[in-house]
Image: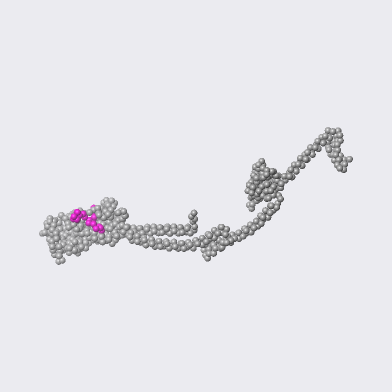
Amino acid sequence: MWRSSLVTTFAVTVSLLVVIAGAAMAYLSETAGRHAAATLAERLQLERLTHTLDHLEHRFAAARGDLLKTGRTIERLGADRPEAGVPERLLLEAALASDVVSSMYLGGLDGGLVAGGHDGRKQDPYFMATDASAAGTLRKFAATKNAERGAELLTLEDFDSRRRPWFEAAEQAGRPTWGDIYVLSTGHDMSLPASMPLSGPDGTPRGVLGADHFVASLDRFLRDSDGSAKASTFIMDTKGFLVASGFDERPFLVDDGGRPTGVRRLARDSASPAIAAAARAIEARFPQLAALTGRHTQSVEVGGEAEDFGVAPFRDEWGLHWIVVTTVSKKTYMPEFIKARQSNLAVIVGALIAVALVALVYGRSVIVPLDELREAAGAVAAGNIASQPDIEFARRDEIGGLAESFNRMLAHLRGAVRDRERALQVVESGRQRAELLLEASQTIVLELAVDGTVVAINRVALELFGFEADEVIGRNCYDVLIAADTREELKRRFSQRVIGVSGFDVTSISEVTTKAGGRLTITWRNVLIRGRDGEVTGVLSTGVDVTELKRDELRLQEALSLALTNEERVRDFATASSDWFWEMDSQLRFTRFFRPDATDPSPSRK
């Protein structure tokens, strides 16, 4: 059967404490790490959102400034037909000088166009112009290093600037404005046009000046920013169309041959699960995107992982209204988090192992002495008091105090054992003397328990009653020595007298049945045996066989009765007779005298 010990208890307790402490510290580390990851994700989300909004504000403020500056320059030329009088070089230089504008173009009231620009990275400069500065054929030329027309790159028939969205938007607004994003005819990008109406000194309309902002530049900005910041940002307009994103995805649709269809891509239909999920969540929360104000955060599940995103509107003074969304996944921090957690867990495990080792060493310093004390206590309990040496611990702590107490107890027990042995010797000597007296006594000696059980009986009684000692000792006296006709009554009277219900008889006479069936009359002298507390523990009785005396007494009584009977007969005879009768002793003195007239037999002396 398994038995617990202090060693087992201590080892199990230390193990449990180490496990519990390790689990608690691991849980706290895990919780703190996840909280830190969530905090970092939220902070990064806010920083990326703010950074993107600031970038858009700066970019489009610069675009507005470049357009207004070029427009004022053109208006100062004062030509009746500005599209004919403005050199292509002026528009190209303005586009190359701008950090955000990729091309500038001027449309006249008769549908003509003149333009200058580059590919969005200030490379591959070009010129564009319609024949005769009027609606008709539009030609695109490469620009040489000297800003002259080079090779013809593209020809577009039936071009009319007045039907272009940027032209119409400026005419309708009557002020500088942003137009709708459109897919370039070349299909390599989308353009965000800004346009402003031009007028002469007298306020007469003279055409519309426009500038293109290639959306691809926003894609590059978001991709570069997201790549280093572990965040994903995309922009959509208030109609839900995708404007730009940090993902490698075109914001417009293409056919099976890879040619642009001129149709823009909805953000909720993005090939990126994160963009699609975030766009759907935003549209579900804000059905009217144009009414969205302030910054908001939301969580969405993407591929079984929760991703948080922040959303904020972007507006400028020319009416541009976009929605900027930044998504940050907590799992982007998991490698660093896992690495930090592993380091923390390694430190925790090392610390717990060190604590366990210290606890075990300390435990041994406690358990080993206690085990020695346990073995010593077991030896004392087994009775090896005299052979058990004192416990010697060179300690001044509680265990040392316990050892001192044990030694004092051991010394006390040794003294008690010696006293007990001396007392046993005295008792044994007294017992032997009592047994000698008991055996030497010629009277019956009988010791009974309070229930009548025979505790001791001497040799005289056994020989008189005809029993052996084992036939009597341990049995009820009344069941063995008393006749059945008086047994129950005597047993009841004995119990009542012993427990004090009735008076105790110091002397008594009873008949005892011998083993052979004979009956003896015994006169008893009884003494109550009491314990230290005064309670009756038994009865000591000494008896004398008076059977013969009892018989002699009966014979004497019978003789006396007979004598009395004979004397009455003589008296009756004398009374009835007329004679005189007398009785004399040896000295001739009358002892009895009867006469007829006398009834008293008393003697009469002469």
From the top left corner, tell me how far across and down residue 331 is, in percent. 32, 58
Where is residue 597 shown, x and y percent of the image?
Answer: 85, 34
Which residue sits furthest bottom? 146
Judge left or right: residue 55 versus residue 168. right
- Would you say 145 lies left or right of 591 here? left
Q: Is residue 255 magenta?
A: yes
Q: Main secondary structure of the magenta part?
A: loop
Pick the residue in front: 14 or 52: 14
Percent from the top left, x then y, of residue 421?
Answer: 62, 58
Q: Nearer the viewer, residue 56 or 18?
A: 18
**With respect to residue 477, does 148 lie above or below?**
below
Q: Is residue 565 magenta?
A: no
Q: Where residue 467 sits: x, y (%)?
A: 66, 47
Residue 542 seen: no
Outermost residue, right side = 606
Q: Give the residue furthest to the front.
A: 516
> For the image shown, how many numbered marks are present on the structure?
0
* Residue at 80% over, 37% down: 566
Camera sees residue 235: yes
Q: What colour scheme was applied to this rendering of the protein?
A: one colour
Residue at image position (78%, 40%) is 560
Q: Quadrant of the C terminus?
A: top right
Horizontally, residue 111 falls left or right of residue 435, namely left
| Magenta residues (range) | 238-260
